[in-house]
Image: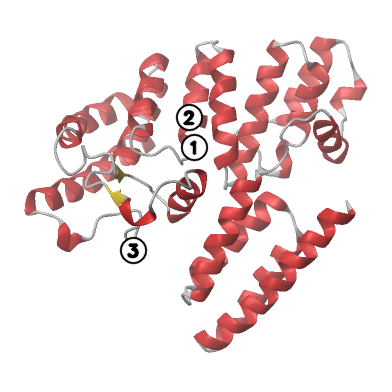
């Protein structure tokens, strides 16, 4: 795989290709400002000329080639390769154009304008170039939920779950899963998914689980038992029922692989970011301790930090394995 899986090297780009990339970033900034001013219609008009250029770029080499993918984060490249072990990493190359960001923004604008079918279709365009971004599937689930198509919501969130490496995306998964289960009349499991929401989004960025639980308790006639379900009880209920709780093995293994590589490369700021992500999605105390250790090692040389961090990482991995065995 290319050294940086998220972008093509500038010295490999033609002048026209570099201009497309620069123009795209400038457009994203203008669109973001228009969104902050609550003008999605104006933002869409700003984005449309870029989308036309991206459609043309997608039909031309190199971006039309099957080995061209558009990961927006190195972890997505790792996830893709771990999910597709038959793919040669050295054969994967980044696209010239930023399709994932552009079509993701396009979808958000269309959703804000109430054009939910078009918003879902915009995500389809992004997925052509990046199937490893869990957020794309969750955004499409949001559009399908607005359309009342909960079968499609279920397909979207189950496609997202193995790829989720961000805590708030796990929270969104549980909220969407709860809503799906409500439509199926499975109120006890729905309540459990709502109850664990704050394990991954304590600030309630995307949902208000307490309000959802009380509304569900009232609507189902289950009363206090659902409204005051604890997250610990809920997590056990989900596990007994075979429901997903927390991250997938693929996600955790991938993050650990990325962590090892960043530590060995001496990229300690990147390693700290990965460890913080692991702590947020697993709540395993070993990751929090490693996070504190990395902060303590900040004053040491790169070699000393790498050696100490790797030693601690090996111990943390063994402690986690021992904990799984004893669970």
The residue positioned 83% from the left and 13% from the top of the image is: 218
Q: Position of residue 121 (x, y in %)?
A: 36, 21
Q: Is residue 47 left or right of residue 139?
A: left
Task: Single out the residue that lies furthest toward the left.
Answer: 15
Q: Tell whether label 2 touches label 1 (CB within 8 Å).
A: yes
Label 2 packing within 10 angstroms: few (<14), some (14-19), many (20+):
many
Q: What's the coloring here?
A: secondary structure
Q: Give 88 or 174, whichever is nearer the viewer.
A: 88
Q: Which mark is residue 3?
A: 3
Residue assigned mark 1: 135
Q: Is residue 121 left or right of residue 184?
A: left
Does 315 sit above or below residue 74?
A: below
The residue positioned 19% from the left and 30% from the top of the image is: 55
Q: Is residue 291 left or right of residue 73?
A: right
Q: Which mark is residue 139?
A: 2
* Rendered-image quadrant of the N terminus: bottom left
Numbered label tally: 3
Label 1 packing within 10 angstroms: few (<14), some (14-19), many (20+):
many
Quadrant of res 50: top left
Among the two numbered marks 1 and 3 on one chain, the one whose residue lies closer to the N terminus: 3
Task: Single out the residue that lies furthest toward the front.
Answer: 86
Q: Secondary structure at mark 3?
A: loop
Q: Tell whether label 3 touches label 1 (CB within 8 Å).
A: no
- Separation of residues labelled 1 and 2 (CA atoms): 6 Å
Q: Which mark is residue 8?
A: none
Among the two numbered marks 3 and 2 on one chain, the one whose residue lies closer to the N terminus: 3
Quadrant of res 298: bottom right
Does 222 sit above or below residue 295?
A: above
- Separation of residues labelled 3 and 2 (CA atoms): 29 Å
Q: Position of residue 307 (x, y in %)?
A: 60, 83
Q: Secondary structure at mark 1?
A: helix
């Amino acid at each position: 795989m290319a050294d940086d899986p998220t972008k093509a090297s500038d010295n490999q780009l033609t002048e026209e290709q570099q201009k497309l990339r620069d123009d795209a970033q400038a457009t994203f900034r203008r669109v973001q400002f228009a969104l902050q001013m609550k003008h999605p219609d104006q933002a869409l008009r700003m984005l449309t000329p870029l989308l036309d250029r991206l459609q043309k770029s997608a039909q031309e080499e190199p971006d039309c080639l099957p080995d061209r993918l558009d990961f927006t984060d190195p972890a997505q490249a790792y996830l893709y390769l771990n999910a597709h072990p038959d793919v040669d990493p050295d054969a994967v190359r980044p696209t010239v154009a930023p399709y994932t960001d552009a079509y993701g923004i396009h979808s958000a604008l269309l959703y804000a304008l109430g054009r939910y079918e078009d918003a879902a279709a915009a995500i389809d365009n992004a997925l052509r170039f990046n199937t490893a971004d869990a957020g794309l599937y969750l955004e499409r689930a949001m559009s399908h939920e607005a359309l009342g198509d909960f079968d499609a919501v279920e397909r979207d969130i189950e496609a997202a779950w193995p790829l989720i490496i961000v805590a708030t995306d796990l929270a969104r998964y549980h909220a969407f899963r709860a809503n799906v289960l409500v439509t199926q009349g499975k109120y006890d499991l729905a309540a459990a998914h709502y109850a664990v929401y704050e394990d991954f989004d304590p600030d309630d960025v995307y949902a208000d689980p307490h309000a959802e639980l009380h509304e569900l308790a009232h609507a189902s006639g289950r009363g206090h038992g659902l409204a005051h379900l604890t997250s610990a009880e809920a997590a056990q209920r989900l596990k007994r029922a075979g429901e997903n709780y927390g991250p997938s093995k693929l996600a955790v293994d991938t993050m650990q692989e990325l962590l090892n590589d960043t530590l060995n490369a001496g990229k300690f700021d990147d390693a700290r970011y990965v460890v913080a992500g692991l702590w947020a999605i697993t709540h395993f105390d070993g990751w929090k301790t490693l996070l504190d250790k990395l902060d303590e090692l900040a004053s040491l040389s790169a070699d000393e930090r790498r050696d100490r961090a790797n030693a601690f990482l090996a111990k943390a991995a063994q402690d986690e394995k021992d904990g799984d065995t004893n669970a």
